[in-house]
Image: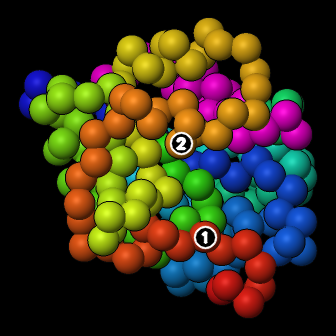
Amino acid sequence: MAGMKHVGMVLAAGASSRMGRPKALLPAEGGRPLACVQAGLLRAGGCARVVVVLGADFDRIAPQLAGEEVVRNPEWEKGRFTSVQTGLRALGDSDGCVILPVDAVGLRVETVRAVLARAETGIAPAVRPTWRGQDGKLLWISRALAEEWRREPAGDQRLDDRVRARVERVAVDDPALLSNVNTPEDL
């Protein structure tokens, strides 16, 4: 299994209504937009290619993500799963895909690497990191699961529900796995 090709996606299609401005553009490390920082994290962790999935405010956000591959989810209002499907279709074939919500801030690159190392064992069609027994926001899915999801009709079922019976968990020392920046106060 060594030498598998993994890809990644940053989910940033929502309206960010509680934040009051696009989360993808929040200033992060070095003042760079958060979506760029998250994409860089996935690349540093081992993803060969990364896309940022946008929806709401696409025309305003996309030009500000210089150097990133962005894709538009025209059905973003139908739920997060439509963004996952958009990202999977754009990424094409790979051995697996890491899915990261843009607002899961501060994850360590070692966490992404640990997930990919577990994924390469081929033990499960999905891998999710945990911290102190709680599921993190990051998720890896296999090629087979990605192909299945690409074909499914759009819907708003939660990703957690879709993988619950098929996920392998890997414990990591990364409390940021539980982060979820939704409001200016959360920053």
Q: Residues within 10 Å of mark 1 (few under 14, many from 20)?
A: some
Within the image, what quadrant is residue 110 found in? bottom left
Which amino acid, mark 1? Answer: Asn
- Residue located 45% across and 53% down the image: 138
* Cα distance in 3D space between marks 1 and 2: 15 Å
Residue 51 lies, in percent from the top left, at 56, 41
- Residue located 23% across and 36% down the image: 119
Question: Does any portion of residue 36 appear in the rendered image?
Answer: yes
The disc, 1 or 2, on the residue closer to the chain's N-terminal end is 2
Question: Does any portion of residue 109 appear in the rendered image?
Answer: no
Judged from the image, the secondary structure of the residue bearing numbered disc 1 is loop
- Residue located 62% across and 34% down the image: 84
Judged from the image, the secondary structure of the residue bearing numbered disc 2 is helix
Compared to 2, does 14 lie above or below? below
Q: Is residue 95 magenta?
A: yes
Residue 142 lies, in percent from the top left, at 35, 25
User: Left or right: where does residue 13 sit relative to residue 57?
Assistant: left
Q: What residue did someone put label 1 on?
A: 180
Which one is nearer the viewer's eye here, 69 or 178? 178
Which one is nearer the viewer's eye here, 23 or 127? 127
The span picked out in magenta is 77-98
Q: What residue did someone put label 2 on?
A: 160
Q: Residues within 10 Å of mark 2 (few under 14, many from 20)?
A: few
Residue 150 lies, in percent from the top left, at 59, 16
User: Left or right: where does residue 101 sit relative to residue 144?
Assistant: right
- Residue located 53% across and 73% down the image: 179
